[in-house]
Image (cartoon, rainbow, N blue to C red):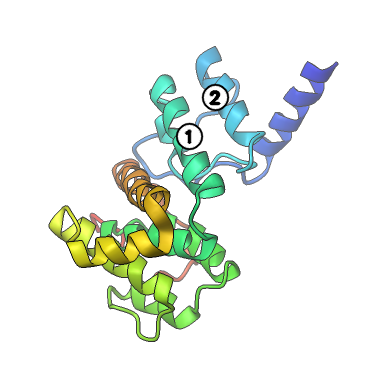
Amino acid sequence: MKAVLRLATVSLLFAGSAFALTGERMPEMTLETMTPAQRSIAEAIMTGPRGRMSGPFNAWLRSPILADRLQKVGEYVRFNTSLDKRINEMAILMTAQAWGAQYEWYAHAPLALKAGLDPKVLAAIGAGRKPENMKDDEAIVWEFTTQLRRDHSVDDAIYARALEKFGEAGIIDLVAVNGYYDVVSMTLNVARVKPPAEAEMPFKQAGQ
């Protein structure tokens, strides 16, 4: 009986707007077309904290073992990280902007605002500018993330500030959220996953 209820729940999730808006390269998969391995992972994603299939997951299911590993990492860096949700979402949006990943911006900009990120800070990130009047933790995340992506490392000064503010665990979580969403953004760009046509974006989709 539990199995039947679980299948019904998953089917309802598929029946709505559960899947990402995928472009030309990787057609959306349904439960009926999935292998047992793919279906098991899709069910785990949709019955977990995300509640639905979106973003890179349709593409990742082409490699089920990798999809499972990545979605578990993503669940940690999004829902269980030691970083405050506001600055975690800020790092995600900086990554989306750097890669020109419009779907990622579309998905996470509302979450950042809900978590308390100033709309002016959000707008500056979208435009590729350093925001003004950031909070102290935001300024650390901006500099750390900027150096990490630009220089492939961080200098002693920003490392010390991050260590004092977030601790070693926070530094690793900040590195991880950047790295994970690099993979997400790369996947979205390769698979051509796009936001709805009516969505207003602050930057062009990579490859356009």
198, above or below 9, in the image: below
Q: Residues within 10 Å of mark 1 (few under 14, many from 20)?
A: some
Residue 203 in view (yes/no)? no
Task: Residue 22: give x, y in percent of width and height.
Answer: 44, 44
15, above or below 115, in the image: above
Q: Tell me which residue sits at (77%, 27%) in the image.
A: 8
Q: Tell me which residue sits at (32%, 42%) in the image.
A: 183
Q: Nearer the viewer, residue 113 or 42?
A: 113
Which residue is farthest top?
36
Q: Identify the residue position indicated by label 2 in the image.
A: 41
Which residue is farthest right?
1
Element under disc 2: helix
Task: Residue 37: give x, y in percent of width and height.
Answer: 51, 15
Q: Tell me which residue sits at (50%, 79%) in the image.
A: 118
Q: Tell me which residue sits at (62%, 27%) in the image.
A: 43
Report the quarter where the N terminus lies.
top right
The answer to whether the residues at label 1 and label 2 have Cβ atoms under 8 Å apart is: yes
Q: What label does residue 106 carry, if any? A: none
Task: Residue 133: give x, y in percent of width and height.
Answer: 39, 86
42, above or below 139, in the image: above
Q: Amino acid at mark 1?
A: Gln
Q: Amino acid at mark 2?
A: Ile
Q: Identify the residue position indicated by label 1 in the image.
A: 71
In-image side of 49 versus 189 (left or right): right
Report the quarter where the C terminus lies.
bottom left
| Separation of marks 1 and 2 at Cα, in angstroms | 9 Å
Residue mark closest to the camera, 1 vs 2: 1
Q: Nearer the viewer, residue 43 or 135?
A: 135
In-image side of 43 versus 135 (left or right): right
